[in-house]
Image (spheres, rainbow, N blue to C red):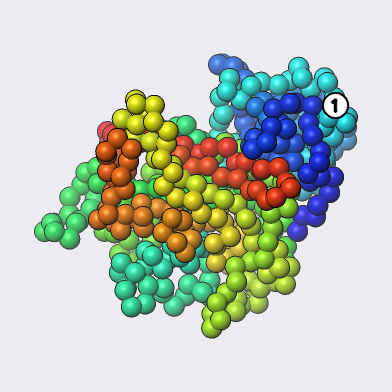
C-alpha cells in the first residue's frame, strides 16, 4: 500500500495562492487529474487541479524530467488511459514532480503560462471506461433494502462471505454536468393487474465511491488480496441512477439490468490512491459472530489499513429551488468508512475467477449508506420507498426524483492538521422522458 512521502507534507504550500485557501478542494497535497478543454473548440487533454486552476499537463512537459516528463507527455490525449497505462512508478514520479514544481519553495513560474481557471474550462469524461461493475459493499444499505422483502432476515446468506456485485454498462457513463434522461421501462406496481411500459415513476440516485483500475490483470489469472490495492489508480464520486419500479419488476430473479444501465454519472477528477494514503484506516470492524473472510479475501495489511475515510454528501435542487436561487438541500452525509468490504477485497474478488481487469475499468462501491438515517444514501431508504417524502425549501416534497431536479454529490477527505482533499462535484439534472 502507498506509503507517505514529501507530497503528503501538510505544511507544503503552493505558489498558486488559491490552493492554500482553507477548505479549498484542491490543495497541493491533492493534485487530482482529469480531462479538460481550456476553451470552446480546443482539443481535450489531461489537466491537474490546483486551487481554482487547472494545469495543462502536456503543455507543461518541459518543466519535468525522466519518467515524470513521460507521464506528462502521455497527457496529450482525450482520456487518462495512456498516462495510467505507464504504471504506478510513473504516477508517483509525476505526483512528486508536480508537488515540487507547484510548491512555494521551488515555484516553477513557467507553469503559470499553462493554467486555466476551472470555471472557464469544460471538464470531460476523465477515463475511457470499457468495463463497469458495481458492488453492494455497505451492509447498512444491503440490510435497509433487504428489509422490504425479507423483514425477518434482510441479509441473504452470502452477504458476509463475498462482496456482491453486478456488471453494469460502460456505454452510458457520463461526466458530471451531463443531463440524465428519465428512463422508460417495464414496471408492474402491486396495485396494477398487468405490467406496462413507460417513464419510470420511481427514479432514484445511489451515492457511491468509484475507483479506476490502473494496473491490468492477465486473462485467466487472479489478483492476490495483498496486491489488490496496487491495481487501483484513483477514486471518484459515482451516481448509480436507479429506476426502482423497473428494478423491482425486472430483477426476478437476476440482478439489475435496464433499471440501472441507462446512465451513470461520475465526478470529473480522479483523486489518486496516493493522494488518499493519509486517509487509510482500519477495515470495517466485523461484529462479533460474523464470519471471517475466506483466505483469498483476507490480508493483515488490508485489515489494518484497507479502509478509507472519505465523506460523501448528496444534495437536491429542484427546478423551482434553482429559479428561486435557493441553495441545494443536503439530504445525506455518509462515509466510505461504512463499507463492509474494502476496495482491495472488491477488486480481488472481481478478479478471483480469472476474468481480467483492464486499465480504466470502473468499479463502484455500491450505495454507501451508514447506520443512521441521516447517512442513508438513496431516496429508497431515506423516504421508505416514497412513503415518507422529504420536504424541500419552498414547500415541495420528494419521494423520488422528479423531472428538473438536480442531484449533486460532493466528497472530501479531511482530518485535523491536514488540508482537505476534495473530489469536486458529481451533478446532473434529470430531464423528462423522451
Ligand atoms: Ca449501485
Question: From the viewer's perspective, is 74 left or right of 189?
Answer: right
**Which of the 4 image quadrants contains residue 30?**
top right
Question: From the viewer's perspective, is 55 left or right of 262?
Answer: right
Does residue 9 sit above or below 133 in this rendering? above
Taking depth in this image into account, of 208 and 287 the one nearest to the observer is 287
Q: Residues within 10 Å of mark 1 (few under 14, many from 20)?
A: some
Q: Report the residue at 41% width, 68% height from top.
A: 143
Q: What residue is shown with label 1? A: 107
Q: Position of residue 88 (x, y in %)?
A: 77, 48
Q: Position of residue 298 (x, y in %)?
A: 66, 73
* Residue 212 visible, this angle: no
Q: Position of residue 202 (x, y in %)?
A: 28, 49
Question: From the viewer's perspective, is 81 left or right of 339?
Answer: right
Q: Judging from the image, what secondary structure is the residue with disc 1 in? A: loop
Does residue 19 sit above or below 414 in this rendering? above
Image quadrant occupied by the N terminus:
bottom right
Q: Report the residue at 35% width, 48% height from top.
A: 204
Amino acid at each position: 500500500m502507498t506509503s507517505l512521502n514529501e507530497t503528503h507534507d501538510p505544511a507544503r504550500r503552493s505558489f498558486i495562492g488559491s490552493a492554500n485557501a482553507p477548505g479549498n478542494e484542491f490543495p497541493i497535497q491533492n493534485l487530482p487529474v482529469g480531462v479538460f478543454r481550456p476553451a470552446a473548440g480546443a482539443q481535450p487533454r489531461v489537466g491537474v487541479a490546483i486551487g481554482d486552476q487547472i494545469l495543462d499537463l502536456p503543455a507543461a512537459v518541459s518543466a519535468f524530467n525522466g519518467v515524470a516528463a513521460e507521464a506528462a507527455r502521455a497527457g496529450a490525449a482525450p482520456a487518462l488511459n495512456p498516462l495510467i497505462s505507464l504504471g504506478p512508478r510513473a504516477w508517483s514520479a509525476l505526483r512528486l514532480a508536480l508537488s515540487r514544481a507547484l510548491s512555494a519553495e521551488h515555484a516553477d513560474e513557467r507553469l503559470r503560462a499553462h493554467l486555466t481557471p476551472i470555471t472557464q474550462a469544460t471538464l470531460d469524461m476523465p477515463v475511457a471506461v470499457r468495463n463497469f461493475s458495481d458492488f453492494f459493499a455497505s451492509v447498512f444499505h444491503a440490510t435497509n433494502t433487504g428489509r422490504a422483502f425479507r423483514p425477518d432476515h434482510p441479509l441473504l446468506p452470502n452477504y458476509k462471505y463475498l462482496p456482491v456485485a453486478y456488471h453494469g454498462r460502460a456505454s452510458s457513463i457520463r461526466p458530471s454536468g451531463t443531463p440524465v434522461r428519465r428512463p422508460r421501462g417495464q414496471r408492474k406496481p402491486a396495485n396494477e393487474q398487468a405490467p406496462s411500459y413507460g417513464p419510470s415513476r420511481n427514479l432514484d440516485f445511489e451515492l457511491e465511491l468509484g475507483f479506476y483500475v490502473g494496473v491490468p490483470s492477465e486473462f485467466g489469472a487472479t489478483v492476490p488480496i495483498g496486491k489488490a490495492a496496487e491495481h487501483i489508480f484513483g477514486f471518484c464520486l459515482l451516481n448509480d441512477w436507479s429506476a426502482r419500479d423497473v428494478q423491482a419488476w425486472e430483477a426476478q430473479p437476476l440482478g439489475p439490468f435496464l433499471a440501472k444501465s441507462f446512465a451513470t454519472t461520475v465526478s470529473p477528477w480522479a483523486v489518486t490512491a496516493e493522494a488518499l494514503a493519509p486517509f487509510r484506516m482500519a477495515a470495517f470492524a466485523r461484529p462479533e459472530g460474523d464470519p471471517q473472510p475466506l483466505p483469498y479475501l483476507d490480508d493483515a495489511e488490508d485489515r489494518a489499513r484497507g479502509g478509507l475515510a472519505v465523506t460523501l454528501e448528496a444534495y437536491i435542487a429542484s427546478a423551482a429551488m434553482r429559479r428561486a436561487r435557493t441553495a441545494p438541500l443536503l439530504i445525506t452525509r455518509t462515509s466510505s468508512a461504512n463499507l463492509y468490504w474494502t476496495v482491495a477485497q472488491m477488486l480481488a474478488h472481481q478478479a478471483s475467477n480469472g476474468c481480467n481487469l483492464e486499465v480504466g475499468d470502473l468499479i463502484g462501491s455500491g450505495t454507501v449508506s451508514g447506520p443512521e438515517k441521516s447517512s442513508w444514501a438513496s431516496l429508497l431508504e431515506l423516504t421508505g420507498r416514497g412513503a415518507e417524502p422529504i420536504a424541500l425549501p419552498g414547500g415541495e416534497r420528494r419521494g423520488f426524483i422528479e423531472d428538473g431536479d438536480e442531484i449533486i454529490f460532493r466528497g472530501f477527505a479531511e482530518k485535523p492538521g491536514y488540508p482537505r482533499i476534495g473530489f469536486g462535484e458529481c451533478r446532473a439534472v434529470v430531464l423528462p422522458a423522451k
